[in-house]
Image: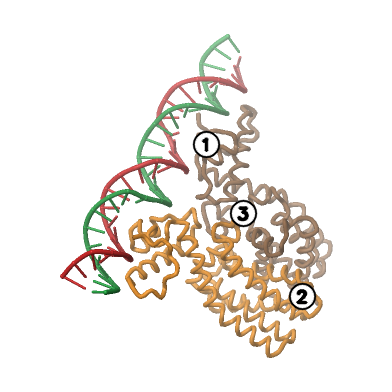
Chain colours: A orange, B brown, C red, D green
Amino acid sequence: MSRSDGQAWEAASGYRKGEAARARILEAALSAFGANGFKGATTRQIAEEAGVNLPALKYYFGGKEGLYLACAEEIVERYRRQMLGPILEAQAGLEADGSPAQARASLKIVIAALADQMMESREAEAWTGFVLREMAEPGPAFDILYGQVWAPGLDLIAYLIGVARGEGVSRKAARIEALLLVSSLSAFSTARPMSLKYLAWPDAGGERFARVMRIVDERIDGVTGRS
Amino acid sequence: MSRSDGQAWEAASGYRKGEAARARILEAALSAFGANGFKGATTRQIAEEAGVNLPALKYYFGGKEGLYLACAEEIVERYRRQMLGPILEAQAGLEADGSPAQARASLKIVIAALADQMMESREAEAWTGFVLREMAEPGPAFDILYGQVWAPGLDLIAYLIGVARGEGVSRKAARIEALLLVSSLSAFSTARPMSLKYLAWPDAGGERFARVMRIVDERIDGVTGRS
DNA sequence: GCAAAAAGATATCAGCCGATACGTTTTTGA
DNA sequence: TCAAAAACGTATCGGCTGATATCTTTTTGC
């Protein structure tokens, strides 16, 4: 029978064979949706890349939209897995020492981890594109990604900016600063092809990534008020 | 006869009726491509919104891709028409007084004009989306838009940053700063739906636009080195 | 080992897409 | 006024898309 639920599984002990196929489909879908969007990606293309036949998509995810939503949930998990460490590190530092200087240091940790996802990671390229596209044109996955990724991430950054600045900034102004700061990183994710061409860079990894981050850190010093 | 050339016209004295239809198609295409991308937009949807029948698109533009390229050329013209004033103003100020302070003032003028296009202008919303999408996923119009819009715009901004900073910044570092600065504005164009939701704003016009610009100006002060 | 459930494959559907062959009406210059 | 060019309309084509009805094979629990 069909099991288009696609949820509440994991621990069920039986029929493990299909998990591999399901994972391959999800991986292919993440890549295809991230690169071409919901409408641009085709189910046949995803099925072929995953090495399955077409009805398998309906079988595992109920259809194209179900697959899209499953991608969003997968992205949330990967985002958490990747950002959990840096976020905990930033929070721990701030709990030990609530000074503006420590808040600035924590902010740099969080931003560096975020930038690493958006710029360096080849595997994160697919889901970064997925997320940013969904924020630009809200689709079925907007609420999931906004609520689970953007809102908490921006809240943390805005909070750190507020602490680093002391009392000199309103809550809303800190939020605007957070938006501007994060979206400045999109130069090397959303607009990467253009940025690389403009800088005559073959890629944005290694020393080049470090160079950008040095400048971003200077911007953070500026946002958080330091000469 | 078909006249799919779509070029070298303007001054020809005869058969003016079709110009209106051509303009309506271009307007509809700009809106549709900007909102949904090349693949997402359909020729039927464009034809219907323009109030013409389907073959009119081939008649005037040779096909879907020809229409897409015509949109890019139209965007270049609109961009120049909108930015020419502020750019001339910025250059005039710098020629009269080549000081870092004047460069910073000129930079603020250019960025404000750019931000106005990306945030405020409802009519510019369509072509802003078109441009940013093409930079993210290079398509047939990438070279036109990069060469005619992005490269000269970023060059000017990077140059102004260099002058404002004095000798303390390399040419390449100024280019990176320019990329980060411009892409920070994309929070309110590309990612507008998300940003508005995060700030609980119904729109980004009027006083809200001014508030963002005050913060952006502070960022410019930071980039160009001032406490 | 054997019924049952899961997993996978084949074939096909209706719908929309971009394109265009072809006919008709309108506008133009002389 | 009249032929030519331009502008517009109808009808339809082949191709691709997402979906699904139906059947076969594999894996599982007992």
Co-location on one chain, circles 2 and 3:
yes
Q: Nearer the viewer, mark 1 or mark 3?
A: 3
Comparing A34 with A77, the one in front is A77
Answer with left or right where residue A88 lies relative to residue D29: right
Residue to which mark 1 is pinned = B4
Co-location on one chain, circles 1 and 3:
yes
Cα–Cα gap, marks 2 and 3: 32 Å
Q: Residues within 10 Å of mark 1 (few under 14, many from 20)?
A: some
Residue at image location 51% in from the left, 35% down from the top: B54
N-terminal of the pair, mark 2 or mark 1, is: 1
Q: Which mark is residue B129?
A: 3
Question: Where C3 sits versus B223, above or below?
Answer: above
Whether residue B47 is visible to the viewer of this picture, yes or no, is yes
Circle 3: element type: helix
Q: Residues within 10 Å of mark 3 (few under 14, many from 20)?
A: many
When asked about the image quadrant of residue B109, the answer is bottom right
Subunit ID for the residue under disc 1: B
Q: Which mark is residue B225?
A: 2
Comparing A74 with B77, the one in front is A74
Question: Where B59 sits versus D28, above or below?
Answer: above
Q: Nearer the viewer, mark 2 or mark 3?
A: 3
Q: Position of residue B194 (x, y in %)?
A: 64, 62
